[in-house]
Image: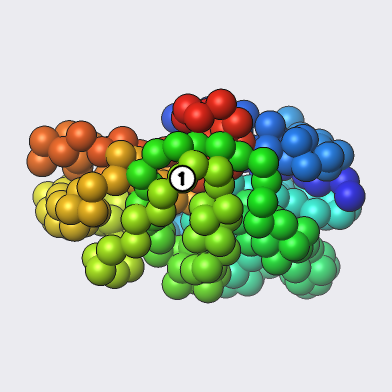
Amino acid sequence: MKVFLFVPCLVDQAAPETARATVRLLERLGLDLHFDRRQTCCGQAIFNAGFRSHARRLARRFIRIFADAEVVVAPSGSCVSMVTRHFGELNLPPAEAAEWEALRGRIFELCAFLVDRLGVTEVGARFPHRVSYHASCHLLRDLGIREQPLRLLRSVEGLRLIEGDWGDECCGFGGVFSAKYPGLSRSIADRRARALSGGGAEFITGADDSCLQHLQLAFARIGSPQRTIHIASILASGTGGPG
């Protein structure tokens, strides 16, 4: 299987370790990886800000770049949600809309790709730490991905998965929401961080670096020692430490 990596711009600019972990993980599984350097932002932020024409140009570029890809995988539920669900709201030209319809079924968030496409839950990882999982909103509510990350975490050697009664509340990031309403965004994040910190986990993991970075700041504000880590870094770990 020839797998094309879609590395979202936030990962590229602010969390490159997630991209590197994704590469190590997929290469460990023997996959043929490809990275097209022409890729840029998928347009999610400007789409959410209401700039549909600008988002449309980025969507058309994405479709052209990945049109012939056998499989596209990204370590981000948020951006996969954008390219598989919301491109259809951008009034694409008919030919490109047809290309997008053909492509969207071949685009996967990392955890869903491993579990649903490859049928894999054991990836040879070792991470002897207490871990809790935060389900990001786009991953859970837009893509319906709930059990796949948990199944992968339960198969990691040495990992103790702490599942509390804190539910699936938003972390408060919400892309441009956190910029437009910073006070409310911080309040939501602090509430979520207090709930997650109550389980006694050393690490909080998830599938979106935007949410994890937002929560890391919240843990610092409330004086909690928890650290956030993308699930790709856990799954790529074979030495008992992050990454």
Residue placed most toward the observer, 187 or 182: 187
Task: Answer few, some or many: residues within 10 Å of disc 1's Cα (few below 14, many 20 plus, some between 14 and 19).
Answer: some
* Residue 195 picture location, percent across and down: 19, 57
Horizontal relation, residue 220 to residue 240: left or right = left
- How was the colour assigned to the protein in this rendering? rainbow
* Residue 89 picture location, percent across and down: 57, 72
Residue placed most toward the observer, 135 or 106: 135
Residue that protrudes farthest toward the front in the picture: 158
In terms of image quadrants, where is residue 129?
top left
In terms of image quadrants, where is residue 169?
bottom left
Residue identified by numbered label 1: 159
Tell me what residue is drawn at x 89 percent, y 50 percent. Answer: 1
Tell me what residue is drawn at x 60 percent, y 31 percent. Answer: 238
State whether residue 56 appears in this view.
no
* Residue 182 picture location, percent across and down: 18, 48
Tell me what residue is drawn at x 18 percent, y 53 percent. Answer: 198
Q: Mark 1: which amino acid?
A: Leu
Residue placed most toward the observer, 108 or 112: 112
Circle count: 1
Q: Provide the secondary structure element on which disc 1 rests.
A: loop
Residue placed most toward the observer, 216 or 37: 216
State whether residue 191 appears in this view.
yes
* Residue 50 picture location, percent across and down: 41, 60
Horizontal relation, residue 132 to residue 142: left or right = left
Tell me what residue is drawn at x 34 percent, y 55 percent. Answer: 162
